[in-house]
Image (cartoon, helix red, strand yellow):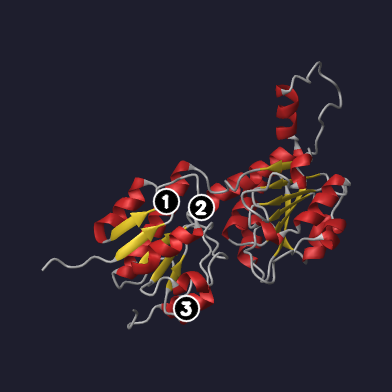
Amino acid sequence: MIPIKPRAYVTRKIPSEALDIIAASCDYRIWDSEGEPIPRDVLEAEIGDVDGVLTLLTERVDRHLLDAAPRLKVVANMAVGYDNIDVAECTRRGIVVTNTPGVLTETTADLAFALILAAARRVTEAERYLRQGQWKTWSPMLLTGVDVHGATLGIVGLGRIGEAVARRARGFSMRVLYANRSARPEVEAALGIERRGLDELLKSSDFVSIHVPLNDSTRHLIGERELNLMKPTAVLVNTSRGPVVNERDLYRALKDRRIFAAGLDVFDTEPIRSDNPLLELDNVVLLPHIGSASIATRTQMAVMAARNLTQVLAGQTPQNPVNPEALVDDRK
């Protein structure tokens, strides 16, 4: 008798290296689009008979969706963050949730530092100026920005990515401060960085880079009060999750020039709405959530998610469980 393979669903077109891993042990279906997320009603219909699903951050895995998937054993999220998933509800149902940490650390840190440099030196604004034919002559104070070298960088959240950004700052001779729930003395000693409370960090930093997960305690962590603590010459960079920063308060601070600039890779609503007032401003660099978007890293993320998925369906412990308490011998 031919053994019955577990069934899986993949919610977006992903690299073939990852699909090959799934195909080797599963019967799978896929929403075969790279640019468009799967419609909610289609996803609900597709997962009714599956044992595992590979999701992106664009899919909201909540109680209603889980009700549509009575056989589900694993949700393999192709992301480090998992704020799109009701982990507590998955755990209650014995469904394992996995993520893809570590693999995107260096690539995302590169992007965070790119935003620091681009916002400080007005790179995208200057390119628009040139492309629009406005550049007529070299001028002493044309498009002048602020220096990065020798400045003070404040890192909010010293996890893997925050630490990687701190390492890059050493190459620019920056003083680095960090705010974190717990002290990291070994990193302080290795990189010569200093821990501060959030308020003191905001007051002292020329650049503030945010690297915290989105949860109840970090939602709108940076709002009007915090922005008013920053220097008028300061730059705010966010590559974590959009709602960590109160977007309306940030817009007002940028429009009123209470801070110099911002660099954002994440937003309250993604994709960004065409009527978002941030689009009107020159002193903000806006990117379409590409923090981990190198070919190598996105491929590795997909492969890791595929392995997590297939490991759970094979009755094994996955490499990256978010809720290990759901890993029990009598899984469905």
Q: Name which residue lies at 43% across and 52% down.
A: 12
**Which residue is under mark 1?**
300
**Which residue is under mark 3?**
91
What label sits on residue 104 in the rendered view? 2
CA–CA distance between discs 2 and 3? 26 Å
Whether 7 is drawn above or below 153: the answer is below
**The one of 198 and 189 positioned closer to us in this rendering:** 198
Please name the amino acid that badge 2 sits on: Leu
Q: Image quarter for residue 123?
A: top right
Q: Image quarter for residue 287?
A: top right
CA–CA distance between discs 1 and 2? 8 Å
Tag 1's secondary structure?
helix
In the rendered image, is residue 235 in sight? yes
Callout 2: few (<14), some (14-19), or many (20+) C-alpha neighbours within 10 Å?
many
Q: In which quadrant is the C terminus drawn?
A: bottom left
Are dots 1 and 2 in contact, CB under 8 Å?
yes
